[in-house]
Amino acid sequence: MNKVVWLLVVNCLMLICVPCPVEGRVTRLVVESSTPYAGGATFGDHGTFERLTGTVYMEVDPTNPLNAVIVNLDRAPRNENGLVEFSAPFVIIKPVETERGNGKIFYGINNRGNNIEIQFQTFPVLPSGASSDSGDGIIFRLGYTFVDAGWAGDITTTATRLGADLPVAVQSDGSAIVEPIRIEYTGTGYTLPLKGNDRFRSYETADTNTKRSTLTVRDRVDGDRLVVDVDRWAFGRCPDGQASLQPTTTDICLFDGFDPNRIYELIYPAKSPWVMGLGYAVTRDLASFLRYATNDDAGNQNPLLGRGGNDIRRAYGFGISSTGMYMRDFLYLGFNEDEESRQVFDAVRILIPGTHRLFANVEYADPNVYSRQDQHTDFVSYSYPPLTYAVTTDPISGIRDGILKRPDTDPLVFHVDTANEFWQMNASLNVHDGRGEPVQIPETVRLYHVASHSHVGASGVSAIPTATGTCAYPINGNFSYSTVLRALIVALDEWVDKGIQPPNSIYPDVRDGSLVTVAEAAKAFPDVPGVVFPTAANGLAFLDYGPSFSSIGGRLTLLPPRRGKRYQVLVPRPDAEGIDAVGIRTVDIAAPVGTNTGWNLRAAGPREMDLCGLSGSFTPFARTRVERLANSDPRLSLEERYGDHAGFVAAVSEAARGLVDQRFLLDEDAQSIRRIAEASGILRDTGSR
């Protein structure tokens, strides 16, 4: 045998003996039902659509560097190949004739199991209780295939909510992991699930002896914690008080009842954490499979295959609020690169997270809660560095990092915040550092601020609110920025697919004075009768959760966390009308019938100067000059602004044309808004508004 042949034989034997690396992937994608979407309606040239539901089964290699970032993945059970298995339910809404679609995936990541993306893209807004299927279907009229899959292990899948079947981490000997965790409550009655509500599965307590847990109560967010005596509460359900107590490992009973004006905090020994960080792998691997694969390991065909094979050209990811935070984590942790080093999403639209990240990649993660001024101030989800998309040095923590640091696989980004995220989620730190110095925005990112909106919109042309709920002032919010989001679908696609630059960032900035302190904003706000301006936004400190926690997540071992140095947090400067000076002004803001704000205060009571959650406020303008002067209102009346109903309609039309020119409004939506204004009662002779 000559030397060359001998070497070939040896090399072949080595290939046989040495195990090849195993890649994580979708092993089975099982379609369990197929039904016509929207009653079989036709969506333009793309034809009819169908709704597919089923389960996707996956496995990942814990030793792959792309997966090793997942907390407790090394403590999850493995199959005979050394891989970790998990699964999730999915929903796909696609053209019946796949080749009639646009070849692009619209991946709408569910919020707490709920598909809210279609609702947020619908205009005109649907009546309360109406199915999103009955909307105008812009996503489908544009030809997209809509995809969603469960990702959170603490959600039980139902007909309307998607959870995920994630493994439970265990000790090396197979025993349960037991660690203290912290839960905050505000509520009424005598009993609550340990998670705080019944929409999520609670982590069981490992010990029902209350002497081994601590329950405290305080009157204010920053108030002193007073310990509740161990004989005044128990683990269990007690709908009618102590006499009705039924011991459980997943509920808390407070014998004297919960006071809705007080804040309760429980630290207890929990057991059996889900490997929640695998949720990011669900999104990565399902999107990658649908985009690139033809069949799964079992031979099931990719449901998006057309007659010519897999014609998917683009995939875009969308997240709202908590899943906006999720998407910031998804990018930061490197999940936009699949295990074959391919880009998953070409572009993403991240909506209303401020600078929070979700931190699902934490042992005993609770992705339902997030930090805001009036509750959970020092809980994750939280604004923990890196806060910026660009790689920068955080002057408070000294951490040098950025959300986007993988240029080969990072997507293009639209990040959209309302005014509320500046008040509650530290949004200003997208554009300045912890000392108030400006930071750069990458060329691949656009930041958009929807001026004077609450977390869910503003009021005006089509809706004038009167209800206050638990807040001090009428609550605005009518999904009015859905028109902006619809226009941004088009702009995002044109940026990726055609290289057309999107609108420039429109976001308050320290350099032009449009970001200011709360005290400076209060001075600029008009003296509106009966309206008190807030004295505080949600502040931010660098939190120390112990040595096992870092920017990627980890374990929370210091409970509550130790507060470190504080960040400069700023809010939008209002103009003389009380409207944010810089931002995208929807028609409700550009042709206003009152002052919308991104903040509201709690109703009169013990916590009346706390912000009222994610709610904004609306204060209507006087109808006439006489009425305005009688109320000492400095803001012009409706008649002074518009004259009459026709003048109001003309102002709405002009504002809509301006937004169309800026590419923040589709022409079809501008026409709808004009019709809504024409049908409104604003400044009609009847006096009805």
Image (cartoon, helix red, strand yellow):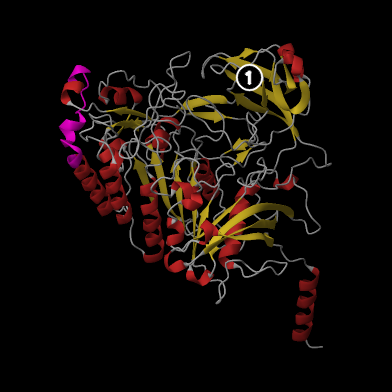
- Residue 154: give x, y in percent of width and height: 66, 40
Name the residue rendered at 75%, 81% in the picture. Answer: 8
User: Does residue 257 appear left or right of residue 442 in this picture?
Assistant: right
Which of the 4 image quadrants contains residue 20?
bottom right
Question: Which one is nearer the viewer's eye here, 350 or 483?
Answer: 483
Question: Which one is nearer the viewer's eye here, 676 or 335?
Answer: 676
* Residue 642 within the segment the image draws in magenta: yes
- Residue 13: give x, y in percent of width and height: 80, 75
The three-letter code of the residue at mark 1 reads Gly
Which of the 4 image quadrants contains residue 175?
top right
Tell me if residue 93 can be seen: yes
- Residue 601: give x, y in percent of width and height: 41, 22
* Residue 279 within the segment the image draws in magenta: no
Q: Name the residue under label 1.
A: 189
User: Does residue 582 appear left or right of residue 47 in this picture?
Assistant: left
Relative to residue 274, is residue 290 depicted above or below? below
Magenta-drawn segment: 629-647
Relative to residue 641, is residue 278 depicted above or below? below
- Residue 313: give x, y in percent of width and height: 49, 67
User: Does residue 333 appear left or right of residue 194 in this picture?
Assistant: left
Characterize the local packing of mark 1: few (<14), some (14-19) or many (20 or more) Cα atoms within 10 angstroms. Answer: some
Relative to residue 216, is residue 486 depicted above or below? below
Image quarter (top left, top right, bottom left or bottom right) of the N terminus: bottom right
Name the residue rendered at 71%, 52% in the picture. Answer: 86
Relative to residue 79, is residue 215 depicted above or below? above
User: Does residue 479 appear left or right of residue 57 in this picture?
Assistant: left
Name the residue rendered at 71%, 67% in the picture. Answer: 297
Name the residue rendered at 61%, 58% in the picture. Answer: 286
Image quarter (top left, top right, bottom left or bottom right) of the C terminus: top left
Mark 1: secondary structure? loop
Tell me if residue 441 can be seen: no
